[in-house]
Amino acid sequence: MSRTIKVLLAEDQSMVREALAALLGLEEDIEVVAQAARGDEVLAAARAHEVDVALLDIEMPGATGIEVTAELQRELPELKVVVLTTFGRPGYLRSAMEAGAAAFLVKDAPAAQLAAAVRKVLAGERVIDPTLAAAALADGANPLTDREREVLRAAADGSTNAELAAALHLSQGTVRNYLSTAIQKLAVRNRAEAVRIAREKGWL
């Protein structure tokens, strides 16, 4: 009989986490040995329980699933990461893969599909939700630079250029230029639309 696959499950919504843990627990060869409600708890838990596969929600307090994926790949490169999301945003898929995720699935995928993904990534395969993969290809790469994304993220709360400049340690002219370029690249009329579109595509 093959050995049991040790899984860590990180998800901030306890009902969702417990449901996923219960479903995976029905599989003979999979055991959820650790759970985390925050992204910044994952690395320590993964080390303590010597897990094989980490299932990460993409939006968690403490650190996002994408940030945690990059951290795990850096600190525990043998650990396989499966990123789960409620939001089918193509930009998230691209970011997760760039961070080193071995699989990217939407949370409402059937339990059997999730269990199969755990087995496949441990065998060295990549598993990507086909609908998201097609959308990511259609959308193309994120056109925004890191700086443009940083300024757009900061502008999401409606801060003025002066406030953004102070917060980001940039001149007001530089902030204006970054926002203008981002607006042009996204083919929208203003910063609010730029933030909305970038968020919808998972580019922020």
Image (cartoon, rainbow, N blue to C red):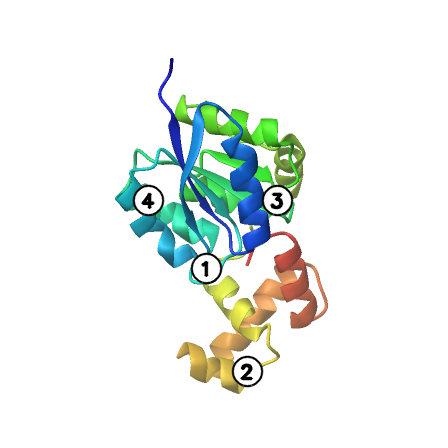
Q: Residue at x 53, y 55 (%)?
A: 59
Q: Are marks 1 and 4 in contact (CB under 8 Å)?
A: no
Say if 184 sits above or below 126 in the image.
below
Decide which of tag 1 and tag 3 comes sooner along the chain: 3
Q: In front of the other: label 3 or label 2?
A: 3
> What residue did someone put label 1 on?
146
Task: Give left or right: position of 42 versus 97.
Answer: left
* Labels 1, 3: front one: 3
Q: Secondary structure at mark 2?
A: helix
Q: CA distance from mark 4 to mark 2?
A: 42 Å
Using the numbered discs, state the Cα–Cα distance from disc 1 to disc 4 in whole angstroms: 29 Å
Q: Are marks 4 and 3 in contact (CB under 8 Å)?
A: no
Going by the image, does 122 lie left or right of 59?
left
Going from N to C along the chain, the mark reached first, 1 or 4, is 4
Task: Assign a secondary structure to mark 1.
Answer: helix
Type of amino acid at the residue the image marks with label 2: Asn
Q: Which residue is mark 3?
A: 90
Q: Write the residue at 46% across / 24% down.
A: 119
Label 4 or label 3, whichever comes before in sequence order: 4
Closer to us: 130 or 160: 130
Q: Quadrant of the C terminus?
A: bottom right
Q: Could you tell which of marks 3 and 2 lies nearer the N-terminus?
A: 3
Residue 141 seen in the figure = no
Residue that appears at 70% across and 66% down: 193
Gap in angstroms between the C-alphas marked 1 and 3 = 18 Å
From this view, report whether residue 30 is shown above or below residue 64: above
Which residue was labeled with disc 2? 161
